[in-house]
Image (cartoon, rainbow, N blue to C red):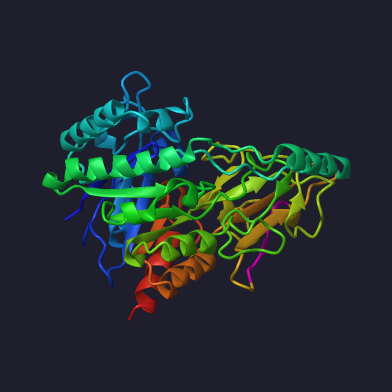
Amino acid sequence: MIKLFYNILIVSSAISFMTTTANSGIINVFCYYDSRTYYREHQANLKPEDLDPAMSYCTHLIYGYATISTHDYKMMPFDPTLEMDHGSVGGGADKEDPQKYNKLLESTERRNSFINSAKILLKNHNFDGIDLAWQFPVIKPKKIRTAIGSLWHGIKKTIGGTKLVDDKSEEHKEQFSNLVMEMKHALKDDDYVLTASVLPNVNSSLYFDSYSLKDNLDFIIIHGFDYYTPDRNPKEADFAAPLHELHKRNPKLNIDSVVTHWLVSSFPPEKILLGIPAYGRAWKMTSYSDVSGVPPICIDGPAPRGPYTKESGLLSYLEICTKFLGHENNTQVDSQYYLKKIPDLTNRHGIYAFRLPDKRDERGIWISFEDSESIQNKALYVKKKDLGGIAIIDLTLDDFKGVCKDVKFPLVKAATNMLHISRR
């Protein structure tokens, strides 16, 4: 029986063919569905009937997104103009007053308003659970400085110390635990599933008390990507979703670091899911970029938006796979327009592809992304760590029509097949 989860603020919704609670040995594959696909055209418009091939691989389907009203702190659809018949609960990441999430946590009355409204939405739309992907303040990105700038920054740190992103983090940590406990209590009579997501670049130790959360959450979903993005790092491109720590990088900005934190904190491994992106982060290469393409690399902000997703600095897997030499649907004749793919021989950092700029210093691009091989490597990591499964984020960005290799949802299929093979 398929079960639906609501995704709000990301806060989420899901579907289950097997079980909705963590169980050692069960393979969980959470598949996100972003309602923004409703507005996309042509190959990027995933209709409900297009989901059928993915349902043989996914155990849960998460619908996004919902948001929080700044007026009364009730949960509400991000885009109320979309009907639930289209499988939509909103339109994307909530950028309106990000402080409202912490404001909600700070008040018992606001938490109750949120929880009561969430129950109403779940019942009205026949959803079976909710995922709390709370928008806590994120780690500040590394700034690219000149030698003089670096010297002055070091002096300022010595004199004034490091400025905190949230001076009430301890309070918010406790209040989030309270919200989860209160919500679990409110939902238990209806047997709703409650999960939480750790969004990219959020410090887990700063905002999540694993000891208090482990008995009140059915799963924790670690979004293991977007450690580097064109918005956060406009002057330097690097691997967006490294599996392990890389040389001379922040040791916390990789999947293994975050997963290890949760395991060391005694959070049950069968309740941990690894979130993997079905898209790539794309930067614009110029004549100043290293022609080798080896990251970290000097860059000039986000690459132009793709023809389908139409979001600068982000390309769906479909928009990437059609750019490789030899693809039957690519009509370019000159090989300079194709991407050069660099494999990950170490299985530590992921793959990337790039195209050097032309003589007019245009068309240069550098992309960190996942393909069938790299996503299988992450599925194997999940197996080795005895985690509860994976989350694909999201279905609308996979090649769901099988344009590139005549295989629908190739990323979902590759990851799920590897999980099953590795557990036989």
The foreground one among 293 and 112 is 112
Is 268 within the magenta?
Answer: no
Q: Quadrant of the N terminus?
A: bottom left
In the visual, does 59 lie left or right of 381?
Answer: left
- Find residue 349 and report its horizontal and vertical position in percent: 61, 64
In the visual, does 59 lie left or right of 190?
Answer: right
Residue 34 visible somewhere in the drawing: no
The foreground one among 182 and 369 is 182
- Find residue 293 and report its horizontal and vertical position in percent: 75, 57
In the image as oriented, which residue stretches furthest toward the right? 148
Q: Is residue 103 above or below residue 377?
A: above
Residue appearing at x 44%, y 32% in the figure: 94
- Find residue 329 and report its horizontal and vertical position in percent: 56, 54
Residue appearing at x 63%, y 73% in the figure: 346
Residue 200 visible somewhere in the drawing: yes
In the image as oriented, which residue stretches furthest toward the top? 71
In the visual, does 240 lie left or right of 50?
Answer: right
- Find residue 206 and report its horizontal and vertical position in percent: 49, 47
Residue appearing at x 35%, y 24% in the figure: 69
- Number of marks: 0
Q: Quadrant of the C terminus?
A: bottom left
In the image as oriented, which residue stretches furthest toward the left? 189
The magenta segment is 337-344
Res 48 quadrant in image: top left
In the image as oriented, which residue stretches furthest toward the bottom? 424
The foreground one among 294 and 181 is 181
